[in-house]
Image: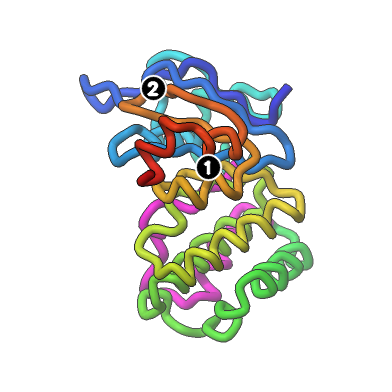
Amino acid sequence: MSLLEVSGIDVFYGRVQAVRSATLEVDTGEVVALIGSNGAGKTTTLRTISGLLHPLRGTIKFNGLDITRIEPQKIVGLGVCQSPEGRRLFTRMSVLDNLRMGAYTRSSRADIKTDMDRVFELFPRLKERMNQIAGTLSGGEQQMCAMGRALMARPKLLMLDEPSLGLSPILVETIFSIVREINATGTPVLLVEQNANKALDVAHRGYVLETGSIVKTGSGKELLASADVQKAYLGM
């Protein structure tokens, strides 16, 4: 049994179908990449796993529990946490308060402090900026804050939506290095990313999504070596 099992989900916006019979899995300890062009349905898939959308057909199971119709806040409580596309920070609040918001479902102050220290270890820049208003951070710092906020929920599965979007090449390297480090400490990651090269390089396995349908799957190395993937997503 996989940690996350998405089985044949169909997702609509009104009459427009955004995801078609999508099936994917994430096992404990894995980084799984979901790649595809703009409008392929990647973000919709994550939003459906998070409970923000519900599929018309298909099921989603987490740790063996059917979460297909469960409310988003309960899914977060189960340990499925997302760092959304566009970061979605509380821009008028401090970095520290944004991170605290990530732990809103938790009650143990000692555990929250331990995880805050871990976030500051992963993102030293956030410790330097902890009292700064989040909306005044650079794009890279805002991405770090969004990822740190998700980690403060102590996720059993961390979902990252376009973490490298709009960042400089140096910061992209930093973000993917941190993804590796987060995974190395035991947190599985479901990664949605337009930078297919970087995503597949860090991923154990990957899925290719086209117009709402998963058209190819394999290990990160297999997909990087695929002529179809190279032509469509890697600019080769």
For disc 2, the marked residue is 213
Place of residue 126 in the rendered image (x, y in percent of width and height, measured from the top left): 56, 77
**At x 52% / y 29%, what residue is drawn?**
70
Determine contact: label 1, label 2, CB under 8 Å. Answer: no
What's drawn in magenta, residue-wise?
A: 79-106
Q: Quadrant of the C terminus?
A: top left
Q: Quadrant of the N terminus?
A: top right
Place of residue 57 in the rendered image (x, y in percent of width and height, measured from the top left): 42, 13
Quadrant of res 40: top left
Magenta highlight on residue 104: yes
Q: Residue furthest left?
A: 15
Q: Give the total of numbered labels.
A: 2
User: Is 215 or 126 nearer to us in this picture?
Assistant: 215
**At x 60% / y 49%, what residue is drawn?**
202
Magenta highlight on residue 210: no
Quadrant of res 214: top left
Dot 2 lies on which element? Answer: strand
**At x 70% / y 48%, what residue is drawn?**
187
Crowd band around label 1 with a 10 angstrom C-alpha radius: few (<14), some (14–19), many (20+): some
Q: What's under tag 1, amino acid-wise?
A: Gln
Place of residue 58 in the rendered image (x, y in percent of width and height, measured from the top left): 48, 15
Dot 1 or dot 2: first in sequence order is 1
For disc 1, the marked residue is 73
**In the image, residue 146 above or below residue 227:** below
Q: What's under tag 2, amino acid-wise?
A: Ser
Crowd band around label 2 with a 10 angstrom C-alpha radius: few (<14), some (14–19), many (20+): many
Quick check: 231 left or right of 27? left
Quick check: 40 left or right of 71? left
**At x 54% / y 44%, what residue is drawn?**
200
